[in-house]
């Protein structure tokens, strides 16, 4: 119902001191009582709001003034429900901010933060569309207002991107986004910074206009004290409370000064004098400063200067609280006409149907958020290509660098069967009568394995090369190797120790690198078996006679020569997808939060759950792209082993990505800045890689760590993917579905933690 202006005028005359009850306090647009807010630690607290009282009647413009750092933004954040008071009471539009059905945060409030808090890549039109949609406006309703704001706020073309506007223009777009949905309570944190005087006047005129009929209330902070002359009430804040809360004209009249700045100065001096608590100073103040008589107990000069009462910390209008010399804080309030009830009545909570409880997300919010996220991606195509390309690059690097046999391992060989350097192993004789079998063996090694020989003259020289790191092993072939070897075969069980010794090739390896030493060991022995087999065939003997009596047949799963790449690939693919999702999700959420955009959306009524779900939808699309590309590269381009069902592989990998996203939410919710998020993400990366059986079998792990490893998100998943890829197992296999169960459990755990942290972690 529209009130007649004359009634309003009458009502505004009552903005001054008046006795209040809880009921009347609730009828104000904003009512703050005994508000305390501290930052810092318990042992080292930093008090920002100190027993502050504030009353903002409906339909007024309230100018919140105070020096930089005095706590204005903190107070506004508490009013819009983004920060919690440590103690005290707060009513906004009749309810407690954050309570169910209060509409605060929500569409009843419009908040323009100090920071620009807009997406630079969006145009002015898109920005307004996003905030309009959040506030349940239709696209047509937003469009209808775009032209008005472009003209009124002297903005350039609506299709210009915000990042290409000047700082002042960006602030005006921010103001337009706040005014757009005509909220009942407008909270503007320094909207006129960087705005020229003409436009500043226009903005103030607009505020006066929209508050004219009492439907809109405005709280505005500014450093330009004198521009608040048009406000109906101003609160002068200093030291965590209000020095005064009055209409500007009354303050100027009563202090007998020319400007509000002078009022502020005088009040500040009064406050300082009070703090010094000396009656002599009080005397001088009474002489030098004219303290006006303010009816209704707004500021009680006696309270300021009375020797018994040291410090004024009150507000005009409702109550004045002071600190006595004993340090006890007392309240000087006007005599209440109605006795204030001891107990506060319960918050007014609207009836909620069962359906309302189930509605954890709103369609218009989800539409705006998902649209905004995709639009951001579309406007950042190079960045998106990088984001999709990064895991692909990592997969390529993995496939090219991990798990292959070392190539070109260098050995220093002294072959005493030949007269080196005069003679070389150049003519390889494959007949049974060959007199230089050592040359055949060495040739077999270099042809079939990636080992390079360097012949040297003496055993000493061969060992020196190893000592200098120039070769991985010194190989010594004895003088009569061929004859001794033939004798050894022919003599069989009667072979003499001399023949055994003379037919033994000695290897002096450098085992400082376990991997290379293992490969060298394997290659030299396998090569000898191969060489011997060839020799026996050429001599017409059955090569099986000299086989080891343990025979490895064709493997049931896997290959005769398994590849470490195949072993590590499942874990590495999951790790890449998991941690890319962690980085992306936490990065984008922290970026939005640090730029104030997240805060702004939350004040507009977006809930933490909606934010999470919208992120899940958009990040899921990105992550699906990453997963498909990684799988394509690893299993199609690099042909890693894949015996299983493609759908199961993709399903498991994307589930790991969703799990990573949810961990990213936890990181973003817990960490306040990118640095701590990076530490947390990095800090969890190595333990997961080490403990989830990704690079080394869990069977080799310490028994206690095995228990930890069992519950980690990627352990069962890696095992599951390994079984799908290498054994071709399907979803019905317990090892395979254990991977899914583990990931899904972690998704629920991470989401619950995120929602709880978002709900309870407010200033
Ligand atoms: N999260 C925080 N942790 C610790 N201290 C904080 C935090 N936020 C604000 N402060 C401190 O609280 C004080 C009040 O900050 P606030 O932003 O409310 O001031 P302000 O009056 O809005 O200043 P300005 O006019 O410059 O914006 C400042 O000294 C600030 O450093």
Image: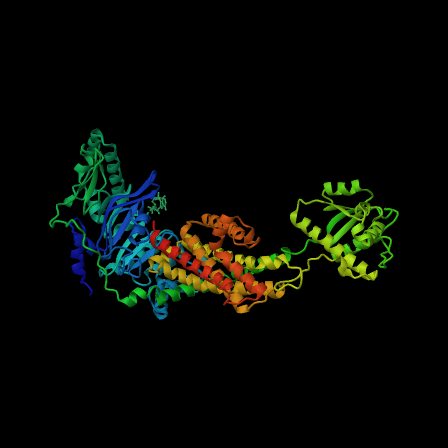
Height in image: 741 above or below 302?
below
Height in image: 8 above or below 141?
above
The answer to whether one can see residue 573 in this image is yes
Total of numbered circles in the picture?
0
Q: Nearer the viewer, residue 16 or 697?
A: 697
Q: Nearer the viewer, residue 703 or 356?
A: 703
Residue 576: x %, y % from top left: 54, 57
Quadrant of the rendering where the N terminus is positioned:
bottom left
Q: Residue furthest front?
A: 494
| Horizontal arrangement in the rendering, residue 506 relative to residue 722 (left or right) | right
Q: Nearer the viewer, residue 230 or 560?
A: 560
Residue 137: x %, y % from top left: 33, 67
Task: Give the image quarter of residue 592.
Answer: bottom left
Task: Give the image quarter of residue 433.
Answer: bottom right
The quadrant of the rendered image in which ligand 1 is seen is: top left
Q: Colour scheme in the image?
A: rainbow
């Amino acid at each position: 119902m529209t009130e007649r202006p004359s009634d309003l005028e009458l009502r505004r005359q009552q903005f001054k001191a008046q006795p209040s009850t809880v009921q009347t306090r609730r009828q104000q647009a904003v009512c703050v009582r005994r508000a305390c807010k501290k930052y810092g630690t318990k042992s080292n607290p930093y008090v920002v709001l100190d027993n502050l009282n504030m009353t903002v009647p409906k339909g007024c413009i309230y100018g919140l003034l105070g020096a930089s750092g005095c706590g204005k933004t903190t107070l506004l954040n508490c009013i819009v429900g983004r920060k919690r008071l440590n103690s005290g009471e707060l009513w906004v539009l009749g309810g407690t901010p954050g309570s169910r059905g209060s509409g605060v945060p929500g569409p009843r409030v419009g908040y323009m933060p100090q920071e620009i808090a807009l997406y630079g890549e969006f145009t002015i039109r898109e920005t307004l569309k996003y905030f309009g949609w959040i506030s349940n406006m239709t696209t047509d309703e937003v469009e209808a207002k775009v032209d008005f704001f472009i003209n009124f706020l002297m903005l350039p073309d609506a299709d210009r991107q915000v990042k290409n506007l000047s700082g002042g223009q960006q602030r005006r777009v921010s103001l337009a986004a706040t005014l757009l949905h005509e909220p009942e309570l407008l909270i503007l944190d320094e909207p006129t910074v960087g705005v020229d005087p003409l436009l500043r006047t226009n903005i103030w005129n607009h505020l006066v206009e929209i508050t004219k009929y009492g439907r809109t209330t405005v709280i505005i902070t500014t450093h330009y004290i004198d521009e608040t002359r048009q406000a109906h009430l101003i609160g002068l804040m200093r030291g965590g409370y209000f020095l005064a809360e009055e209409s500007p004209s009354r303050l100027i009249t009563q202090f007998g000064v020319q400007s509000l700045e002078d009022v502020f100065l005088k009040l500040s001096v009064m406050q300082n004098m009070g703090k010094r608590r000396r009656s002599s100073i009080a005397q001088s103040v009474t002489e030098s400063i004219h303290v006006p008589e303010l009816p209704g107990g707004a500021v009680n000069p006696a309270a300021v200067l009375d020797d018994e009462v040291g410090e004024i910390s009150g507000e005009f209008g409702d109550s004045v609280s002071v600190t006595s010399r004993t340090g006890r804080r007392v309240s000087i309030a006007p005599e209440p006409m109605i006795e204030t009830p001891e107990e506060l009545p319960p918050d007014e909570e609207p009836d909620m149907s069962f359906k309302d409880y189930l509605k954890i997300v709103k369609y218009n919010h989800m539409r705006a958020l998902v649209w905004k996220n995709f639009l951001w991606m579309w406007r950042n195509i190079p960045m998106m290509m990088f984001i999709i390309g990064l895991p692909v690059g990592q997969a390529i690097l993995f496939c090219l660098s991990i798990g292959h046999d070392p190539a070109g391992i260098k050995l220093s060989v002294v072959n005493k069967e030949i007269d080196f350097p005069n003679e070389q192993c150049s003519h390889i004789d494959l007949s049974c009568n060959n007199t230089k079998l050592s040359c055949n063996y060495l040739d077999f090694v270099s042809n079939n394995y990636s080992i390079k020989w360097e012949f040297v003259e003496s055993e000493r020289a061969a060992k020196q090369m190893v000592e200098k790191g120039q070769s991985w092993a010194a190989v010594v072939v004895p003088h009569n190797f061929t004859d001794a070897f033939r004798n050894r075969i022919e003599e069989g069980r009667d072979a003499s120790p001399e023949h055994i010794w003379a037919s033994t090739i000695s290897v002096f390896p450098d085992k400082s690198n376990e991997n290379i030493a293992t490969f060298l060991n394997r290659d030299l022995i396998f090569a000898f078996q191969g060489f011997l087999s060839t020799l026996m065939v050429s001599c017409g003997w059955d090569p099986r006679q000299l086989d080891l009596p343990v025979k490895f047949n064709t493997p049931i799963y896997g290959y005769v020569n398994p590849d470490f790449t195949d072993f590590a690939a499942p874990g590495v693919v999951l790790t890449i997808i998991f941690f890319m999702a962690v980085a992306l999700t936490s990065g984008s959420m922290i970026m939005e939060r640090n730029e104030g955009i997240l805060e702004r959306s939350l004040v507009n009524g977006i809930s933490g759950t909606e934010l999470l779900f919208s992120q899940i939808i958009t990040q899921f699309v990105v992550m699906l792209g990453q997963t498909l590309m990684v799988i394509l590269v690893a299993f199609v381009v690099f042909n890693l082993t894949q015996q299983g069902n493609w759908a199961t592989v993709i399903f498991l990998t994307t589930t790991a990505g969703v799990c990573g996203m949810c961990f990213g939410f936890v990181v973003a919710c817990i960490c306040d800045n990118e640095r701590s998020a990076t530490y947390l993400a990095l800090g969890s990366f190595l333990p997961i890689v080490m403990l989830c059986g990704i690079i080394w079998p869990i069977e080799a792990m310490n028994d206690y760590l095995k228990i930890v490893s069992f519950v980690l998100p990627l352990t069962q998943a890696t095992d599951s993917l390994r079984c799908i890829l290498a054994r071709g197992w399907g979803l019905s296999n317990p090892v395979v579905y254990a991977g899914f169960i583990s990931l899904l459990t972690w998704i629920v755990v991470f989401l619950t933690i995120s929602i709880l942290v978002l709900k309870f972690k407010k200033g």
